[in-house]
Each structure stands twice: as C-alpha cells, then as structure tokens.
Image (cartoon, helix red, strand yellow):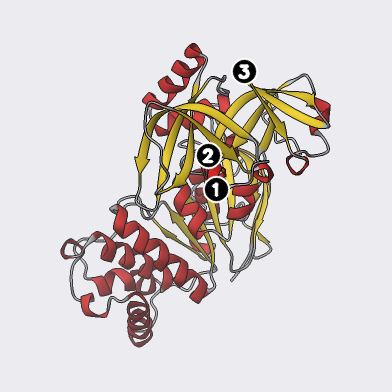
C-alpha cells in the first residue's frame, strides 16, 4: 500500500487549457479519497495523471514517496476501474480477471489461486465460465473490479465506475465497493460527479472547480462547514437555501434584513467576524433540514415567512417550497452548479432575480398541516445558519 501526494501539480494542455492548477494534497495510505465536482472540473484529469495517462505540466506526483512524473504507467503499480468496464467480450470471466496476471507471465497455479480468491471475495464463483454479455451490469462491474483487485496494486483508481448502473444497483455497489476497500486496505482514488456517492463513500472529499481545489475534508466537514458558496451549493439535496441579506445592529445584537423581514440573530448564530459586515450585503445560507415547522421548536428561534407554492410528500417528511420576497443569491459559482444540473435550473434562477422573489425549501414532519397557496412560517435553527461574503464567495467565520 502507498500514499499518493500531489505537490503543486499543474496540468496545462498545448492549446492553453488549464485543467488542474496548483493541486496540493495527500491521499493517505489505505484511504478512500473521492474527487468530486461538476463536469469539466479536472477530476478525471487528476486520476489520469496518477495512472500515467496524462503528463504533468509542473509540480510533483509521488506514490509511496517515489516521484513518478516520468515513470511509465505499467511501472506505477496502480490499477484502474473504468466507467465502461473495459472487459474483453470474447473472454470468460475467469480470463478477464486473470488477464493482468497472464500478461506478467505468472505461474498458472498462482493465477488460478488468485483469481479464485478474488472471485470468492466478489461473489463471482458461479460465473467464472460465463462471458460478459451474459452478465448483469452489476456483475460486469464486479468483474472489472476483480481484474483490478487480483493485481494487488499499491493504489486503486476508479473513474465513475457506477455511472452506467441503475439507481438501485448503484446503492448496492456503493456499499460493496466501500466494504471491499476497507477489507483490502488499498489506497483508493475515486472520481465521481455524484454528490451522494461522494458523501457516502469517501473517508475524505476533495471538491474541485475549474481545476482548483475548493475544499478538502471529511464528508461531514464539507457539509457542516462549507468553505465557500460553491461548496455550500454543490453538496446537499435539496441544495442550501441562499438569501441576499443586509447585516444590521438590532436590539442587543445583530439581525439580518431578508427582503422586508428583519430577523434577529441569537448569539449562538453570530461569529466574531460578522459584526465587520454591519451595513453590508451578504449571503445567508440555511439547509432545508434546518428550516422546520415552528411548532417543533422553542419560541425564540428566528423565523422566515413565505407563501407555500408546492408541498412534496415523501412519506417520512414533507418538502415545503416557500416563495419568499427576497433577492436570491446568483453568482458565477451558483450558475455553474445550476448548469451542471440542467438549463431549466439556470432559467429558474434568472426568473427569481427578475421577480425579486425566491423559492426556499423547508423540511417539515410528515404529519405537518401545510398546503399550497397559503402563508407559512418556517423556524430556522440558529446554530445552523451560514454566512458568506458576496464579493469573494468565502464563508464568514
């Protein structure tokens, strides 16, 4: 096993496109590191540089302490699992898994032992004589993983390996990959654009945007303390509600004006730097699960009013969509996240700007009495309010 270290790594293509800029991080020995971000953020380029399939423009890449910038791919002792499985259709499952060992001309007895052991690990013992076309998508993905595992490499590289599977199978395979990685203890770099995969699988997450590392930490660190507006909106479903607001002094402390509503901030919500923003416009962020029905909290919680435009009943909870008379936060960061979803999301944001109102989402209990068309208050957990500088996009802490 080995650590993987990026030391000020840049990747610039001949046409001047900068795919990765100044990447500095270390993937610890035995860690499962997930690189996540929107399409074109540079995450797959990072993976290909580790594999040796892309040259590094500048900086150092070390695997197990050895600088590998000029080391050939086959000498790096890494194994890659591809999005499209890359199986040989004319070979059996056994031969597909055994291929890297046969290419190294290992003894047949050792090949059979290692393939048999790997197949048992993946639940493929009964399928060793079958061809890929006779397997389900999940079974093909297991074969692709088996071909990587059987090599016993220092590092696993996984490039969106679950993107071709249906939703139910993706959940099963997420659990399976996490279990196998922990069992084998192999350093793993996993690339995905799916935030749910990132949150549920990674020991740590590296969030990229335009080739630049935005935030690095455990899933909970990124979720609970986003470093900037991009991190705040990329992780979380439904996304964090973001209101343009003005900080003001109110009573014995601070308050925020959101549209025509003045919302006092309890002391637990105020950090040391927030007073520096009095009189200035900022972004106030609240995740849907921290906007709840008023009856569920004490009277002292801050509240925000709106008109119910839609209620989604999900069995265990209800998502209440509130139209609030407030300016939405629309920055380049947020538009990039919206574009990664679909064009309609971008247009919805622009409509909100034109109308001077925005739709916020709150999570109410399943039995909450709420219906579309009427006014509604939502209570805000004061210890879960996020503040961002509108000019820099950075969190105010």
Residue on which disc 2 sits: 234
Report the quarter where the C terminus lies. top right
The residues bearing labels 3 and 2 have C-alpha atoms spaced at a distance of 28 Å
Query: Residue 281 is drawn in which quadrant?
Result: top right
Q: Secondary structure at mark 1?
A: helix
Report how far apart the C-alphas of labels 1 and 2 lie in the structure.
28 Å
Looking at the picture, tell me which residue is in the foreground, 292 or 114: 292
From the viewer's side, name the closer residue of 192 and 87. Answer: 192
- For residue 98, above or below residue 188: below
Residue drawn at (60%, 44%) of the image: 56
Residue under the image location 38 percent in, 81 percent down: 114
Judged left or right of residue 329, residue 263 is right
Q: Is residue 184 left or right of residue 140?
A: right
Residue at x-position 42% and y-position 45%: 368
Numbered tag placed on residue 141 in the rendering: none
Q: Are marks 1 and 3 in contact (CB under 8 Å)?
A: no
Q: Earlier in the sequence, mark 3 or mark 2?
A: 2
Q: CA distance from mark 1 to mark 3?
A: 25 Å
Closer to us: mark 3 or mark 2? 3
124 above or below 385?
Answer: below
Residue 199 appears anywhere in the view: yes
- On screen, residue 353 above or below 65: above
Where is mark 1, residue-wise?
296
Badge 2 density bin: few <14, some 14–19, many ≥20, Cα 10 Å: many
* Residue designated by label 3: 260
Which element type, helix, strand or loop, lies under badge 2? Answer: helix
**Label 3: few (<14), some or many (≥20) within 10 Å?**
few
């Amino acid at each position: 096993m080995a650590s993987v270290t990026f030391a000020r790594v840049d990747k610039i293509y001949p046409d001047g496109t900068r795919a990765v800029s100044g990447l500095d991080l270390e993937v610890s020995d035995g860690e499962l590191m997930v690189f996540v971000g929107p399409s074109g953020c540079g995450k797959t380029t990072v993976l290909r540089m580790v594999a040796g399939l892309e040259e590094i423009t500048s900086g150092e890449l070390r695997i197990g302490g050895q600088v590998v910038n000029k080391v050939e791919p086959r000498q790096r002792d890494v194994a890659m699992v591809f999005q499209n499985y890359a199986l040989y259709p004319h070979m059996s499952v056994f031969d597909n898994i055994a291929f890297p060992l046969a290419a190294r001309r290992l003894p047949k007895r050792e090949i059979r032992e290692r393939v048999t052991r790997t197949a048992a690990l993946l639940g493929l013992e009964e399928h060793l004589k079958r061809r890929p076309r006779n397997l389900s998508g999940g079974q093909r993905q297991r074969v692709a993983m088996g071909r990587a595992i059987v090599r016993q490499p220092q590092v696993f590289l996984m490039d969106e390996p679950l993107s071709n599977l249906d939703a139910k199978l993706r959940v099963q395979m997420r659990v399976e990959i996490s279990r196998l990685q922990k069992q084998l203890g192999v350093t793993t770099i996993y690339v995905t654009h799916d935030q749910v995969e990132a949150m549920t699988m990674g020991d740590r997450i590296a969030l990229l945007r335009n080739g630049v590392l935005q935030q690095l930490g455990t899933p909970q660190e990124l979720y609970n303390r986003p470093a900037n507006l991009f991190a705040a909106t990329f992780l979380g479903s439904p996304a964090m509600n973001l209101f343009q607001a003005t900080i003001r002094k109110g009573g014995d402390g601070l308050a925020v004006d959101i549209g025509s509503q003045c919302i006092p901030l309890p002391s637990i919500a105020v950090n040391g730097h927030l007073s520096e923003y009095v009189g200035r416009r900022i972004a106030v962020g609240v995740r849907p699960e921290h906007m709840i029905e008023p009856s569920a909290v004490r009277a002292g919680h801050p509240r925000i009013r709106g008109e119910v435009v839609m209620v989604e009943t999900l069995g265990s909870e209800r998502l209440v969509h509130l139209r609030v008379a407030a300016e939405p936060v629309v920055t380049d960061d947020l538009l990039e996240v919206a574009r990664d979803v679909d064009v309609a999301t971008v247009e919805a944001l622009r409509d909100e700007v034109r109308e001077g109102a925005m739709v916020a989402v709150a999570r109410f209990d399943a039995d909450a009495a709420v219906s579309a068309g009427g006014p509604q208050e939502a209570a805000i957990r004061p210890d879960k309010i996020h503040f961002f500088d509108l000019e820099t996009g950075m969190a105010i802490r």
